[in-house]
Image (cartoon, helix red, strand yellow):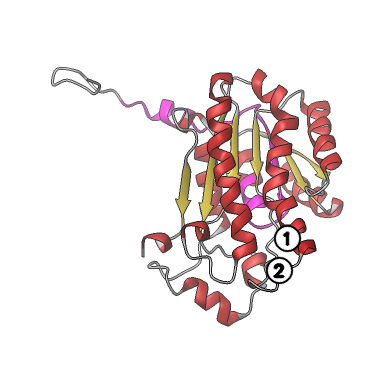
């Protein structure tokens, strides 16, 4: 049986514990990395020593985020990427490898929040939603997989949503993609474990981002109504959870979903 017996001494070394969160010289691709949660993750990873690749649709936004990181003493480049374009995903990995020599971490954060009520969902909207919210995560990891297999610290983090554990009222299309991404997380984790690639999901609650603030105030209040903590989370609170999943602090964790939602799904 595991565990410590009564005569075993437990030694806790602070520096060793902190070192588990160190990402020095690891190469991290972060989609949707120019704003909101993605930007907070990019900044946090860079602060812990990672070489960060900020990917989002707008080149100027990518460059701004990368410049902010480098001015703070980190290492980063921006790569304009439309994650709904499979060619762009391949070029993103190629550009990353050209710049930094490999890939250790993939954070699939880009999302399309488009949603329509049941009965009014169009084929075009459905395709646009699923291309970003599920297809992109699969093909980005597949393009990066040869490099992840070569890494000693390979980790994939898929951003889903705590909404997948609720009724999903009014958000069927968006949450269908995120639910599929969680299923993909588990399958990836099982199939890639022997290659040393860990794959986990992170499910935020209502977070203070442009995507949330773009909703009408009454809808924002509806989102918060079932949240016991009574406030939105911050992007930094999600970034630290992503750091845990991407770092050696979670080396015995794969195929799991970490929910960071202020208690919303337990309410």
Mark 1 closeness class: few <14, some 14–19, many ≥20 residues within 10 Å = some
Regarding residue 189, the answer to whether it shows in the image is yes
Mark 2 closeness class: few <14, some 14–19, many ≥20 residues within 10 Å = few
Q: Quadrant of residue 87?
A: top right
The residue that label 1 is drawn on is 126
Q: Quadrant of the image for the C terminus?
A: bottom left
Q: What SS does tag 1 mark?
A: helix
Answer whether residue 25 is magenta in the image.
yes
- Counting from the top left corner in percent of width and height, residue 75 is at 72, 36
Mark 1 near mark 2, Cβ–Cβ under 8 Å? yes
The residue that label 2 is drawn on is 121
Regarding residue 74, the answer to whether it shows in the image is no
Answer whether residue 19 is magenta in the image.
yes
Q: What SS does tag 2 mark?
A: loop
- Counting from the top left corner in percent of width and height, residue 184 is at 59, 40
Q: In which quarter of the image is residue 148?
A: top right
- Counting from the top left corner in percent of width and height, residue 49 is at 62, 33
Q: In this view, does 32 lie to the left or right of 154?
A: right
Magenta region: 12-41
Give the tally of numbered discs.
Answer: 2
The residue positioned 46% from the left and 69% from the top of the image is: 231
């Amino acid at each position: 049986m595991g565990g410590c017996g009564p005569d075993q001494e437990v030694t806790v070394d602070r520096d060793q514990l902190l070192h588990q969160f160190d990402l020095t010289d690891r190469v991290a691709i972060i989609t949707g990395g120019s704003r909101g949660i993605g930007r907070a993750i990019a900044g946090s990873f860079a602060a812990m020593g990672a070489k960060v690749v900020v990917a989002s649709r707008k080149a100027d936004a990518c460059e701004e985020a990368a410049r902010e990181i480098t001015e703070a003493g980190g290492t980063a480049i921006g790569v304009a990427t439309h994650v709904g374009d499979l060619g762009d995903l391949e070029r993103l990995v190629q550009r990353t490898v050209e710049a930094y020599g490999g890939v250790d971490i993939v954070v699939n954060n880009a999302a399309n929040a488009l949603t329509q009520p049941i009965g009014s969902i169009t084929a075009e909207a459905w395709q646009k939603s699923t291309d970003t919210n599920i297809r992109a995560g699969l093909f980005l990891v597949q393009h990066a997989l040869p490099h992840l297999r070569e890494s000693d610290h390979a980790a994939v983090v898929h951003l889903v949503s705590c909404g997948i554990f609720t009724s999903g009222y009014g958000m069927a299309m968006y949450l269908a993609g995120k639910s599929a991404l969680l299923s993909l997380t588990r399958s990836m984790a099982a199939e890639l474990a022997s290659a040393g690639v860990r794959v986990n999901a992170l499910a935020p609650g209502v977070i203070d981002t442009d995507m949330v603030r773009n909703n009408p105030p009454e809808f924002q209040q509806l989102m918060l109504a079932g949240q016991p903590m009574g406030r939105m989370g911050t992007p930094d609170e999600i970034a630290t959870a992503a750091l845990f999943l991407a770092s050696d602090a979670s080396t015995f964790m794969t195929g799991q979903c970490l929910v960071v939602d202020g208690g919303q799904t337990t309410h």
